[in-house]
Image: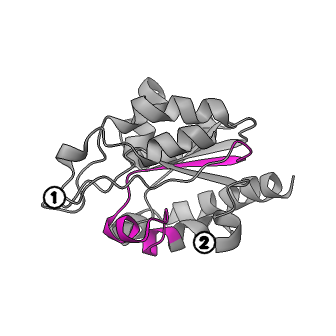
Amino acid sequence: MDSLISEIKKCTLCSSHLPHGANPVFSANGKSKIIIIGQAPGSVVHKTGIPWDDKSGDRLRNWLGVTKEQFYNEHLFALIPMGFCYPGKGKTGDLPPRKECAPTWHHQLFNEIEDVKLILLVGSYAQNYYLGKSKKNNLTETVKSFHEYLPKYIPIPHPSPRNNIWLKRNPWFENELVPTLKSIVSPILSS
């Protein structure tokens, strides 16, 4: 696992497409129990080099019911984005994650993680990639149907402040799915 992590950290596969340069940001360990597959690092995370080290991460940890110490414990959580580097800004927010990363690195990383109990699919990029034809017509329907993907996956929206409107329109998510998510995550972390 150490040599694979080192190889990914040195990756420059798509650096010519990255306006801020290559800086793969992720964390994983062969003993990680829960894998969180996000979108791509944002500008803050690109600078700090710490996955989910921003307001989105704060909200995600709240949804999971975990502390920062638990969240950054690689024996508990692997934090693996669809695109490992910050893709830069677009007209309406960050650009989509680069498409080279997941097919190049995910399978290799997952082969090294021995006993995964749960994979959290954060946002539509991860859900489209991993759920394929079993995903629903849109993110809202996919997240509402989360029971269909258990015990392997739980799809959730991205916790970005940009999704505040979605959260207001879909109060069932924080009222129903978040407590269920916490009830699934807690015993995994205790085991």
The answer to whether residue 114 is left or right of residue 43 is right
| Label 1: which secondary element | loop
Residue at x-position 54% and y-position 65%: 60
Three-letter amino acid code at disc 2? Answer: Asn
Residue at x-position 44% and y-position 40%: 127
Q: Position of residue 6 (x, y in %)?
A: 52, 45
Q: Position of residue 123 (x, y in %)?
A: 42, 50
Three-letter amino acid code at disc 1? Answer: Gly
Q: Which image quadrant: the N terminus?
A: top right
The answer to whether marks 2 and 1 mark residues whose Cβ atoms lie closer than 8 Å is no
Which residue corresponds to mark 1?
90
Image-quadrant location for residue 82: top left
Toward the top, the furthest residue is 133
What is the C-alpha distance between the residues marked 2 and 1? 28 Å
Closer to the camera in the image, 81 or 159 = 81
Q: Position of residue 101 (x, y in %)?
A: 38, 38
- Can residue 136 be seen here? The reply is no
Which residue corresponds to mark 2?
62
Closer to the camera in the image, 38 or 159 = 38
Disc sitting over residue 6 in the figure: none
Report if residue 39 lies within the magenta region.
yes
The answer to whether residue 130 is left or right of residue 185 is left
The answer to whether residue 89 is left or right of residue 82 is left
Closer to the camera in the image, 82 or 74 = 74
Q: Which residues are magenta?
A: 30-57
Image: 100 above or below 41: above
* Mark 2 crowdedness (10 Å alpha carbons): few <14, some 14-19, many ≥20: some
* Mark 1 crowdedness (10 Å alpha carbons): few <14, some 14-19, many ≥20: few
The answer to whether residue 107 is left or right of residue 182 is left
- Can residue 124 be seen here? The reply is yes
Give the tally of numbered discs: 2
